[in-house]
Image (spheres, rainbow, N blue to C red):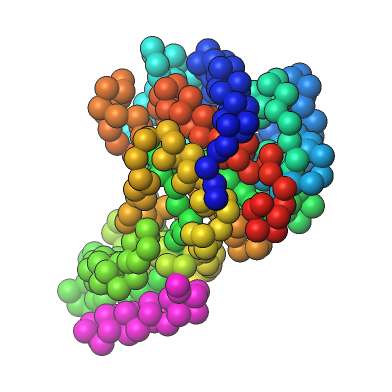
Amino acid sequence: MTALDHARLALLRDAERLIDPERLAELITGMTGIPSPTGEEGELARWAVSTLAASGIDAAYQPIDDAQGNAVARLHGDGTGPDLLLYAPIDTLTTGNPEEDLPRVGATLRYDMVPEPVRDGDYVIGLGASNPKGHAACLVAALEILHRAGTPLRGDVVLGLGAGGMPTNKRTAPHVRRYNAGQGNGASFMLEQGVWADFALIAKPGWAVSWDEVGLCWFEVTVGGSYSYAGSRHRIDYRNAILGAGTVAAALEEWFAEYTARHTSGTVAPQGNIGAIEGGFMRMPAVSPASCRFVLDLRTSPASTPMSVKREFAAAVARIAAAHPRLEIGWDMTLAIPGTATDPDAWIVRAAIEAWEAEEGRAHEPILGNSGATDANILRGRGLPTARIGMARAGAEAPLPVDFPMGMNVVDLREMARLTRHVMRTTINTCTRATADVGL
């Protein structure tokens, strides 16, 4: 039974009365104004620790290296109930630095693509204002409110704001020294250092509860050719590696659709994406290179293993090679993070769904066709039952066009208030119970 009784509902109402949109705006403006590209989250994590400590909450900075670290905080229960980890990453997908971001994100940095927050009515705009910082700010707000309300807890409420949550390896900036700066390294480190719980609730985009999630396998494909010259291509063997790489990439794009259809199940529809290509001399188009390589991200179902996906990819490349016998194709799998799932009957999933249904006044409707991966895979992969909940994307009324960066960089304060209510309800429903009540 997951419904709130009268006593727990009264605790929730006491907490809900303390939700202040201006405090939410203050938190997200503060977080957005501190740059935190992957590998450099330390300053923001320390800000979160000092903010929580100023509210009287037990909080500590967890360094990973001199630039990267996590923020950890805890509301202590009496030890008779389950502990719940509220988790969100705090690094941004891009940096806000034109030297690193341009021209990949566009010809210029739009004003939402820099860590300089702007308030526009109910919206706050700036790099990462929604994903991930708006979600992290909701968790900070929920912890502050539960502490201020004096909510009696049996289990601990643990807050983890993690570094390195974005799907990236080391950035090209020379001052970023560690190669494993992303891919959930902050979440992994946090768990390894003993920050653990019975359940986890991760805040990432999407106003619905999810319990399964895609993983990802990365592949690097190299296509060979003949090192050649524009003045002699008609006189010698001419096999342009760039053209060959384009042929292979186009064939893989067609195969991605087959792959997705084959692996769509539950709430996931794993996609493939070719993200970068490299070959030749930009300073010298007169010559064609001996090889050209590109990298791709292939999302994976929780029902698949990295090795099964690797074999599928091998078969796809073999078919492409057979259809184009003059192409020299080599490849390697360079990264693998399995997709994961939590039993939908697990307490944390049912409690999160109960909170969603209470907010919406109707039966829960999961979002289907998902292909986004988060640190939920790291948490579940280590054995922590995890549910995911987040905010809906800012809609057509938002002050920017509805596109990918807008979804990352524009947050609606009304959505933040709704997510904060959900998090508090799920937390009260969980951490005010005895361990036996939640199946432990």
| Residue 5 in sight | yes
Residue 142 at what x, y percent from top left? 61, 29
Q: Does residue 91 appear left or right of residue 411 in this picture?
A: right
Q: Does residue 76 appear left or right of residue 297 in this picture?
A: right
- Front position in the image: 311 or 81: 81
Q: Where is 248 relative to 49, above or below?
A: below
Is 341 within the magenta?
Answer: no
Q: Report the residue that reaches farthest toward the front.
A: 6
Main SS, magenta residues: helix
Q: Residue at x 76, y 19 (%)?
A: 54
Residue 138 at what x, y percent from top left? 55, 30
Q: Where is 308 relative to 284, above or below?
A: below
Q: Residue at x 37, y 26 (%)?
A: 110
Q: Report the residue that reaches farthest toward the left.
A: 234
Which of the 4 quarters of the picture holds residue 123? top left
| Residue 179 in sight | no
- Quadrant containing the C terminus is bottom right
Q: Where is 361 relative to 220, above or below?
A: above
- Front position in the image: 20 or 73: 20
Count of marks overlaid on the render: 0
Q: Residue at x 82, y 39 (%)?
A: 78
Residue 407 at what x, y percent from top left? 37, 35
Q: Magenta part of the protein: which range?
A: 303-330
Q: Does residue 1 appear left or right of residue 198 in this picture?
A: left
Q: Where is 369 relative to 156, above or below?
A: below
Is 305 within the magenta?
Answer: yes
- Front position in the image: 161 or 346: 346
Q: Residue at x 27, y 80 (%)?
A: 320
